[in-house]
Amino acid sequence: MESVSQSMKQMMSELNGGSDRYRELIHKVLNNDDVKNFLEKNKDSLDKDAIIKSLSKLYEFVSEKNKINSGQASTIPGYEPELKINNHLIDISYCPNEATIKARKQHALQKRIKTLMMPKDVNNASLHDFDMDESSSRMNVLEQALNFIKNYHKTDKWLPGLYIYGSFGIGKTYLLGAIANKLAENGVDVTMLHFPSFAVEMKNSIGNNNVADKIDAIKRASILMLDDIGADSMSSWVRDDILGVILEWRMQNHLPTFFSSNFSMDKLETEHLSVNNRGDDEPLKAKRIMQRIRFLSKEYLMTGSNRRPQ
Ligand code: ADP
Ligand code: MG
């Protein structure tokens, strides 16, 4: 079997009869490193005749590669040509480039996360960037989050979510976002709501008769995260007919639920849920809600410094 470089040399010399322009094109194609490597790798399955018949494909390949390498738009933006053998001849397949693959992954991931009025930076929150050296409580809550993510697919046992509480600006929402992104990467559907804004939206939806539909979609999410629960005073209606209904469904169906709050569970019960926005004292109603929250999640204190600009 003659070597590829020999047969290429021979092809070049046989082209002496062709036009200058044609010779130049062939020269450019057969001197391209990718083409040379491809021909060398496939020398056993390609004879000279096949290479000659495939010259137009090789030329297309080299032109597209040159366009991409010089920063011009290729014919199929986001895709790169690759040489392959098809039916004893050389052919080109166009494969998504790295940026396209990354964008597709990101898109698939974002489709798995539904957010409602969450800050934009949760989209990019990552567990790798969660700083835990400040305190052991941060290390503990991160460890619990990682355990949840690890065990979510593994176990049939009931796995409660995390109720993360601590003061303002320490990264509770950021951590929920990072957990959501990791779960979505693993193929899990996650819904995240800023609870006070969601409550306002529900109130505004009353006239449209679609409150039940909205609650329905939310209560069924595989993972639900209620951010900033307790930040605004609630009406009895929001507490019992919105929050209560969602939590009741999730408890019955064993669907893990995450919370973030400035209040511990005890304080949420006595200082927030017990008193409605008209100031009525309703401790029994608060107890009922808290029983569900305590079933659906486990409480972790998080500490740290306030990262928000003062
Ligand atoms: P909390 O919910 O506890 O009030 P946030 O999660 O909103 O606090 O965090 C406050 C600010 O600090 C936000 O702008 C957030 O993006 C940022 N932040 C929090 N944790 C991190 C982190 N580990 N890396 C980068 N930014 C962070
Ligand atoms: Mg927050």
Image (spheres, rainbow, N blue to C red):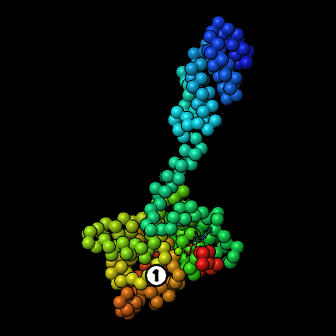
Residue lying at 29% horizontally and 67% vertically, measured from the top left: 210
Q: Which residue is mark 1?
A: 230
Residue lying at 64% horizontally and 78% vertically, measured from the top left: 305
Q: Quadrant of the N terminus?
A: top right
Numbered circles on residues, count: 1
Relative image position of residue 87 (x, y in whole percent) = 54, 21
Residue lying at 64% horizontally and 63% vertically, measured from the top left: 128
Between 244 and 6, which is closer to the camera in this rendering? 6
Q: Is residue 170 visible?
A: no
Q: Is residue 184 above or below residue 295?
A: above
Relative image position of residue 47 (x, y in whole percent) = 64, 15
Residue lying at 70% horizontally and 10% vertically, measured from the top left: 13
Between 241 and 173, which is closer to the camera in this rendering? 173
Q: Amino acid at mark 1?
A: Gly
Local secondary structure at mark 1:
loop
Q: Residue furthest top?
A: 17
Q: Is residue 136 above or below residue 25?
A: below
Q: Residues within 10 Å of mark 1 (few under 14, many from 20)?
A: many
Left or right: 247 as drawn, with respect to 84: left
Relative image position of residue 53 (x, y in whole percent) = 57, 15
Q: Is residue 261 above or below residue 69?
A: below
